[in-house]
Image (cartoon, helix red, strand yellow):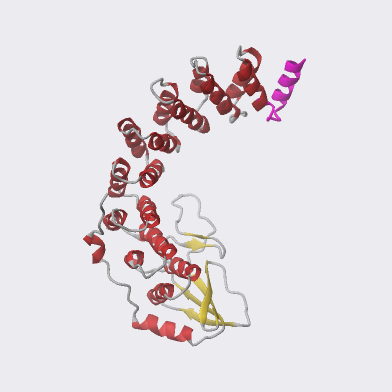
Amino acid sequence: MKRQILGLVAVLPAISVGTAAQNLATSLNRIEDGFVRMSFAAREGVCGNGGGITTWRTNDAHWEPDCEPGPVRVVIERRAGDVEDIDTHVGGRWREHADVIDLGEVPAQEAAEYLISLARHSDEDVAKDAVGAAALADVPRLWTDMMAMARDESFGLAVRKTALFWSGHLGDESVVGMLVGFIRADVHPDLRESAVFALSQQGSESAASALQDIAEDSGEVSTLRERAIFWLGQRRTESHEYLRELYQSIGDPELKERIIFAVSQRATDEDWEWLIERAASGSESIELRKKAMFWAGQSRHEMSDLIDLYDRLESRELKENLVFVYSQRRHDDAALDKLFEIARQEGDTQLRGKAIFWLGQSRDPRVIQFLAELIG
């Protein structure tokens, strides 16, 4: 399918470095060897405990995690005049260190501009770390700089992917159209997939609609459609309803398989019933029925429908698949009882053998007693 870069990405400004950030860079560049520390304000939602960093805060009315809301603390290691490494922390406190220069608290805008400019002139690992540190800064509309980096071919592929990730995470709803333009552009496939993921981080209806357009597009490459389907499966139940409808309109078995998996995630009662229908339907292929059985068995729903299905099946292959599904729920009494029944009463010796084999993988006292009695 012919693609072109849409004009909407052109509205993004080129990355510019303010005078203050240039001064910061000049100060840092005078240091040939050693460590430089600086701190700056973290954007809302960022917190940490000195080790791990999270970019969300709980809305639980009764509980507050032990997570400090900032500042962001960055230590830059310089060797022979180059930046060798960047470590970023939120929360905690600095330790005493002999070989360190501490710049103290710097303005978040200044720090972010410096870190983004640093990414242009550093190796890939340092550049990614610099972008990640900048993304934590309390700077409005920082995602526009991230999108500018993503479209800038002078940056390496990994850095552009990192910039896309943060664009989706930081951006408001106006970033959706820009990400769609990126997805439809003639760029590296990895960048297009990263843009789909960035789109999935947006909770808006326009983002969901854009993911649906990709999932439906028969002219789009399968990998991109699969990614869109997967991320739709992680969204609200309305997306699951959409996926169940989409399943009926596409013929690609691999995409159908992805929809079955996506629907099984956070499965509602409606999703569960739909999976059972797919498992029982003679109009579905054997492979798709097996996938539906397996993912239905991975949910937390009661096993009764899957257990009843066994005696309605004629295919040994499907029955054998169900035996495996039951074996994955050995702590479920109903599934265990069904395995006992198959091991004891099934007329097909191959299926009995499968049931006995999977029972033999369990250390449940009931299973051990059952197998002892069976041997006796």
Left or right, residue 356 beside residue 335: right
> 286 above or below 62?
above
Taking the view exactly as shown, the residue that stands out farthest to the right is 376
Q: Main secondary structure of the magenta part?
A: helix
Left or right, residue 316 beside residue 244: right
Closest to the observer, 194 or 271: 194
**Residue 196: horizontal and vertical position, in percent?**
36, 51
- Reply yes or no: does residue 218 show up in magenta: no
User: Which residue does the image show at 60% across and 28% down from the upper left?
Assistant: 327
**Residue 266: horizontal and vertical position, in percent?**
45, 38
Q: Is residue 337 visible?
A: no
> 180 above or below 369?
below
Q: Quadrant of residue 41?
A: bottom left
Q: Quadrant of residue 213?
A: top left
Image quadrant in which the C terminus is located? top right
Q: Is residue 349 visible?
A: yes
> 122 above or below 6?
below
**Residue 324: horizontal and vertical position, in percent?**
58, 27
Please tell me how many numbered marks the rendered image carries.
0
The span shown in magenta is: 359-376
